[in-house]
Image (tube, rainbow, N blue to C red):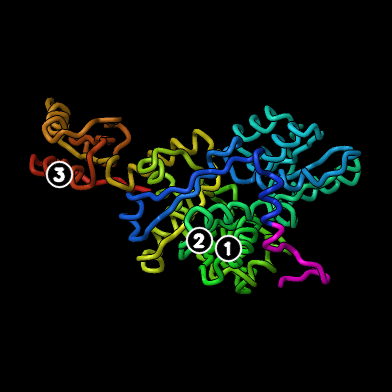
Amino acid sequence: MLKEKNNTIVSPDDVRQAAENIKGSVSRTPMTLSRTLSEITGTECYLKFEIFQFTAAYKERGALNRLLAIKDDTNGIIAMSAGNHAQGVSYHASRLGIPATIIMPEGTPFNKVKRTEELGAEVVLTGTTLEESTAAALNLAEEKSLTFVHPFDDPLVIAGQGTVGLEMLEDVPDLDTLIVPIGGGGLISGISTIAKDMKPNIEIIGVQTEAFPSMKEAMDGTNLQGNNITVAEGIAVKTPGAKTQEIVKELVDDILIVSERRIESALVLMMEVEKVVIEGAAAISLAALMEYPDRFKGKKVGIVLTGGNIDSRLLASAIMRGMARDGRLSRLRISMVDVPGSLAKVTEIVAKIGNNVIEMRHQREFGALSLKQTEMELVVESKDDAHANKLLNALEAEGFTVSFAQTV
């Protein structure tokens, strides 16, 4: 039994009670087998679609469970969030008639700020990190006698998030492994609390980005020196919760670190395979399956698609970078003798091989070549790496000097 000052932090019964509390106000989201991702990862891969919540994220669960405990005579609540907790709090506070103020870090994606305001909360942008924003929220809470709703280090929030795991094991009782994103630790704390009670031998694996490995560092006593730049801003937490650290230490079997590049690839793969849009934090569990294939091969795995609130520009960049990594988008540097017909010859070869020209740049003045030579940069779309290489070989066969520009 987990203890904090002789009181249980969160019990399995707390999670079950939270499920009753939020029933009818939060969606019971689908849990489905992905045949394609199972084939790709060598697992039996089940997806929990928390992106189908009203605010497109699991955070509603913990937010509502906490708000239902707010006293009727409250002056209002205040929360700090980079997005999904903000929207969950804003939506349910408005629905319950509770005044809400949300502190968000400067630089929070515009779509998350706008959506939070549309859901009824007053948004204040302050602080460059979640920690600075938290300090501002706590100061304002004291100044205006507001109730602070913590995004992860609160027993009622943790219990609410745990209902995700409760539903996963009710729907697929024979899961071997749950792979759960970790930011502050609220989701994995709630899930592990109920999952280990329902199935003591289940393996709970946490995942963090290399940019913010804070829980891994806290558990192992290491310093992994994350650079704090991530596409998974929903789990960009420098300091995990004190309560969540205690639960994770007791119940979580392992924490894996994945690369930012792998998260981007997983985000695009999920969109192409499952035809759904997810945010970086939601892609990290699939990223772990891709980065550690031997760790999960042959297992019956459940992963949580935690949220779908991604900035449109970020999504567009991820798609294009993904195409570049897969060889479907290539940038060629082509050197040629500067005589009439050279450019036409290049385009003729491109047409013959069946690639599609996306962008072309032809320059003489700024190149480092001979005055009798010119350089062209060609961005082309191809079916795959082999198709792109076929174009390169065809150009070289006609006497052009060709190289691929470095991809991401």
| Kind of element beneath mark 1 | helix
Real-space CA distance between mark 3 and mark 2, rounded to the nearest whole angstrom: 42 Å
| Kind of element beneath mark 3 | helix
Q: Residues within 10 Å of mark 1 (few under 14, many from 20)?
A: many
- x 16%, y 29%: residue: 347
Question: For residue 195, which numbered disc appears in the image?
Answer: 1
Residue at the disc numbered 2: 178
Q: Is residue 5 left or right of residue 38?
A: right
Q: Could you say which quadrant of the image residue 299 lies in?
A: bottom left
Q: Is residue 288 magenta?
A: no
Q: Is residue 135 left or right of residue 390?
A: right
Horizontal and vertical percent for residue 361? 29, 31
- Return the disc, 3 or 2, that comes first in the chain's sequence: 2
What's the residue type where badge 2 is placed?
Answer: Leu
Answer yes or no: do the residues labelled 2 and 1 have beta carbons within 8 Å? yes
Q: Is residue 379 left or right of residue 220?
A: left
